[in-house]
Every structure is written in structure tokens, then in C-alpha cells.
Image (cartoon, grey):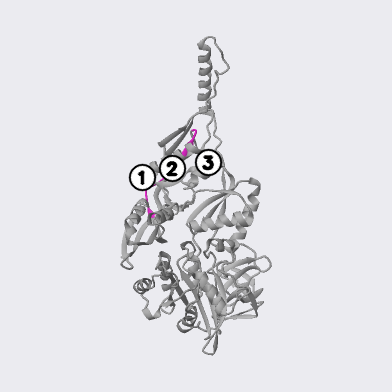
Amino acid sequence: MSNIRNFCIISHIDHGKSTLADRFLEITKTVSEKNMQEQFLDSMELERERGITIKMRPVRMLYEMEGEEHALNMIDTPGHMDFSYEVSRSLAAVEGAVLLVDATKGIQAQTVANLELAKQRGESFKIIPVINKIDLDSAQVEKTEEEMMQTLGAKKEEIIKISGKEGTNVEEVLRAVIKRVPSPSTKKELPPRALVFDSEYNPYKGIVAHIRLMEGELLTKDKIYLFASQTNGEVKELGFFSPEWVPCKKLSAGEIGYLATGIKEVGVVKSGDTISKKGEKTEPLKGYKEPMPVVFNSFYPRDPQNYSMFRDALYEIKLMDPALVFEPEFKEAFGRGFRCGFLGSLHSEIISERLRREYGIDFIISAPSVVFKIKKSNNEECEIKSASDWPEESAISVKREPWVRLEIITPESTLGNVMEVLEDAKGNYVDTRYLSQSRVLIVYDAPLRKIITGFHDNLKSATKGFASAGYKMQGFYEQDLVKLEIMVAHQVDEAFSVIVSRDEAYQEGKEVVSKLKEVIPQQQFPVALQAKVGGKIIARETVKASRKDVTGDLYGGDVTRKRKLLEKQKKGKKRLEKEGKVNIPQEAYFKVFKK
């Protein structure tokens, strides 16, 4: 047990975690040269294509130092803020972390966020600061070193400078893990308790839990109990990651491995849950939290006959990604679909792409929205996930929406541009801190709904790609919110309804009706497009009627014949305007939804 080390790699996105993991696999000969490929632990096609880690991956490596063989259990974690939930779960399963910083970019927003997560583990949790990409001409090693000492509180002699691509000093990182990260505490004599830090679905083995055994021992065929879902099960297979599954008969306290449950039901094996032996009097491990979706989108299959296939696809993805939540929904414009909850905009984008690629389903997706909390006049409190569920204004006494704390790191030269972008977010300035002479950390509180649509693109444009941003949930704050409704030909179309701040309603309404004017085809009658708050119209556009030349067949004769025909046409259009219904093409919805 004294020769086991459990650690993970954490960093901002694209700072070289997966490349460093590749070098570790090569040095320890965990993967043969013949089978080795770049981003080895990133097994999903989307991960390789985008160059990012989406799903954490554990692996056991054997490494000899000073005549002793050590078992190193490493978890390669995602870097994007949407997947910080995965980072927090991996931190709970290990005793130390390699904190990686790109020498060409310095400390970024998610570096700070991940460091805060790591510090929550307490003083016994060891953080190894590493500067990567020192081989590049644009590397600013000394400047990055200064930032790490100032921001992370690292000592100069503790910082290891490496090139993950070239392999320079990478072995020093492995040695530092063995020297600095403590071995897991041994509590084999206690009843078994295992932390589930991830899970995946296997058609033959059911849901396979990735576990860290905190106490005791588990054997194949043991009867088990899952605390969160209050379910009994059996250990169908035990093993460790190398990085493929390697079965074994027993896992002991301190070890990381997998447990095949044979369970094939969604939601039974939950990440963060505790597994114990059936019949043992034990308590669940502390810190279990359900992943909380913060961004919601509605999905509607273009072909209604694909509804069942779409539902099955969502169930399959949820088996591998417990953070995804969904429920059936019906809209007259689209038919049957699903309201899905995600951890952020990138999470939504990844799931959308997987549905298209892996299942071949074509669908329409609504604009992202957030969950609101309201208190009704009768003191009943409820959550609103869709604008169509928003009650009448008179029935609401308190309205709250989620706010986040933004941490933006940017060069000092673009500070003014960043403040302009933040001004559009309609939030509150908190603080400014200098990481170095030329780099600034800005702390800002803002409504989440302003961050999930276009904020990051605007920030990148304003800083030419040099700024990075991360956020964490602050809570629900009381705001003056209203339901903005869009009327097409005097009929409210709920698909376009959104919840906005009262002072933004006019601008938002004006934008939507202007877009609709461009995408709705001409009808035989003028189509009124109106934005409405309560009973008040706040913005209007009109799609002009298509006009048939009813006098084209006439020749000569009395001019009154022409007037009669034109008058008849005019009356017909007025009647149609009152009674006619506009069939809005699905593409029009998609163009309006797209920010």
C-alpha cells in the first residue's frame, strides 16, 4: 500500500494534459509503442477532433524508482468549466494533483478555478505545480513562474518545467508524484466503502462504476448496496484500468478500479455515490451532490417518427453521462420533443453533436435558457424551466434568477474592451487583481442567462483571443423579470417566448420581430409581428402581403371595373388578416433561436 499513489492532472483547457498523459504512458510502458497514438486516453472521436478532454479517464501505471515498483493511479480530467463537476469528482478520489500551466499563455481562468477545487481537499492534499510547453519560441517561462508563485503560492524550487511534446523533464513529474503525494491510508479492517467517481455503460456488463475504495476490501460475487439510489446489487466483475479493463479478484482500500454491477437501469449507479457491502452497518461517504443542470434546451426530431429513437438515444447517453437530465415536452409548432438540462453551453453542444453523429438523428434545438425560481402570491415556490410555464404577472410575488461569479484573465492592454463586454452582461463589478505587470484578473457577478448566449464569443473578439473566462454559481437573486411573448398574425407563439429583464424587453423584442420579418415568407395578407409584455405591445414589424395583379387580364373598358376588382382584393386581404393562420417554417425558428 505504501507504493500506491493516486493523482490527477488538472489545468485550463488546451494546456497539454492529454499530451503529458501520453508521455507518462510511454515512460511507464503501460501502452506499447505499436499501440501508442496521440491523445491516447481521449477515446471519443469528438475529443480528438476538438483537441479537448470531455470525459475523465483513469489508468494504472507501474513505475520503478530507487529499486521499488510503484503503482500510479492517474486520472486525466477535462479542462473546460462545463466539466468542472468531473474534476471535483476526480479530486475526491485521489491524494494529489499535477497542476499544469501553459508557458505561452500563463495562468488562465480555469487554472484558478481548479486550484480552488483542489484546495478544498485540505492541507494533506498535495499540488505539484508544472510549467508545460517550454520548448516553444513563444514560451514565457520566467513570467509564468512568477505568476504561479504569486497566484498559487508555489515555491520556486517546487515548480517543474517540462515539455510534454518533447518529453523534457516529464520523468521528474512522475518522481515528484512519488515523493510528494502521500500514499493512501490503509483501513482494510473496516467494512468496505467505495466512492463512485464515474460510470460507463457496457452492453454485456451493465453499468460499470469507476470506484476508489476508501476502506475495506471488495471481492467478486460480493453483494453490494448503493446508498443514493438505495439499491442492492452484486459485484459481477472487479478490475483496474491499464488503460483497458484488466479483471482481478479483489480491490483493497486505497486502490482505484472498476466494478461491473450488471445493472442496466438509468439513474441507479450515480457518480458521487457510496457503494458498501450489503448488510454492513456503515454510513455513506461525505460530499455526495447531484449534478445540477444550469442550461436548458428543447430538442425536437425533424421527423416525428424518430421520437422513440431520440428517447432511446438520450437514455443511452445518460447511462454514460449522469449530468444530462431530460423530460418529455410538447409544442404545437414542433410536436413531441424533450426538454434537456446541461452543465453549460459546451456540454449542450457536445450532447447535440453526439446525437447527430452516433445516432444519426436530425433535430431542431431551441435557444438555451436557465432555470428561474418564483414565489407565487399564495406563497407557493416553484422552478420555471421554460417560458411557457411562467404564470400571469399578477400571480407572482417574487422572481429570482441564477447569477454566476465570473473570473476573467486578460492582458492589461485589453482591459477597457473587457469592461465594455461586461457592461453588456448587466452585472456588478467585484474586484481587479494583477497577476503580473501585464496580466489582470477581473472578478464580476452577472446573470447566467447573459453568459450562456454569445458572451464568450464577444470576449474573444474584444481581446483577439487572449482572454479566458470561468464561472461558478453564486445563487439565485431577486430580479425584475418579465415574460416576453411574440405574436404572429395576432396569435401568441409560445416557441418564441423568453424570460428577460424588464429594462431589456424592448430591445430583445425589437430584435426578434426584426429577425422574423426576414425569415417568414410573404402571405396573401399582411402579417403583423408583435412583441408583447403583459397586455402591452412594445415592438412591431409587418411582413407585407404578396400582391397578385388582378387587373392584368383586363383590356380597355371602364376604369371602374379595375376599381371593383382591386376593392374586392382589398376586402379579401382584410378578411384573411383577421382569420388567416401563418405556417411558420421550422428553419425560421432555428434562425431566430440562433444568437
Residue 381 visible to the viewer? no
The kind of secondary structure element at disc 2 is strand
Quadrant the N terminus occupies = bottom right
Q: Residues within 10 Å of mark 1 (few under 14, many from 20)?
A: few
Identity of the amino acid at label 2?
Leu
Left or right of residue 151: residue 256: right
Q: Amino acid at mark 3?
A: Ala
Q: Nearer the viewer, residue 33 or 185?
A: 33
Which residue does the image show at 47% across and 77% down from the upper left?
96
Identify residue for label 3.
588
- Marks counted in the figure total 3
Sequence-first tag of 3 and 2: 2
User: What range is drawn magenta here?
Assistant: 477-489
Instruction: Kindly report the distance in space between the C-alpha atoms of the residues bearing marks 1 and 3.
Output: 26 Å
The answer to whether 203 appears left or right of 493 in the picture is right
Label located before the other in sequence (2 or 1): 2
Q: Which mark is residue 503?
A: 1
- Label 2 and label 1: CA atoms lie apart by 11 Å
